[in-house]
Image (cartoon, grey):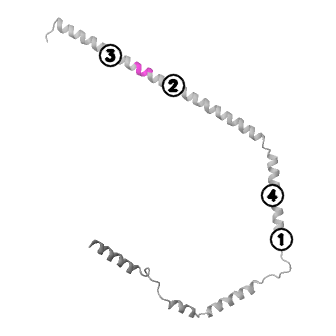
Amino acid sequence: MRDGPAKNGIKAKAMRVLQQKKRYEQQLDNLRQQSFNMEQTNYATQTLKDTQVTIAAMKTGMKEMKKEFKKINIEEIEDVQDDLADLLEQSEEVQDVLGRSYGVPDIDEDELEAELNALGDEIALDDDTSYLDDAAKAPNVPGKEPGAESFRNKVIKYCYSVLL
């Protein structure tokens, strides 16, 4: 196209369209930034609300704990623990008294050792294993159920007879 009024008109129109495009892009960027700012504000507001709920729950829990701790007397707990320890000690004393021996002579460890050695010698001398001979002569345990094979054969023969 040649330079002239028509070309200049088209050029001016193209410039206006490009300017309008730039304005729309700027407006779109502004809207995106505004939307982002609103989302951030919304997020911060929700976080603050959640924080307030958490703090309220913590305060309620603290009040309940204080109320329950007022019902507890540390000195009373210590007294109960001391009483339990005394009772357990008394129980042990009772068991000690009940476990006393009355004139039963002390057992001599040497005598027990000698008796154990004598039993060991007696067992070593007892090499008679003849009582096991009968077990060695016993018949073997059958590997299958008695009569199972013959029953199986009868079933097979019957099936063949029906098929033929």
Bounds of the magenta span?
30-34
The residue positioned 31% from the left and 16% from the top of the image is: 21
Distance from the alpha carbon under mark 1 to that under mark 3 = 105 Å
Closer to the eye: label 1 or 2: 1
| Mark pair 1, 2: CA separation | 78 Å
Relative to 62, 106 lies left or right: right
Which of label 3 and label 4 is nearer to you?
Answer: 4
Residue 19, by quadrant, is top left
Residue at disc 2, secondary structure: helix
According to the image, label 4 marks what residue?
Answer: 85
Establish if 96 lies above or below 48: below
Residue position for label 1: 98
Work out whether mark 3 precedes mark 4 in sequence or the reverse, and give the earlier one. 3
Residue 124 sits above or below residue 39 on the image: below
Residue under numbered circle 3: 22
Query: Which amino acid type is shown beneath numbered disc 4?
Result: Ala
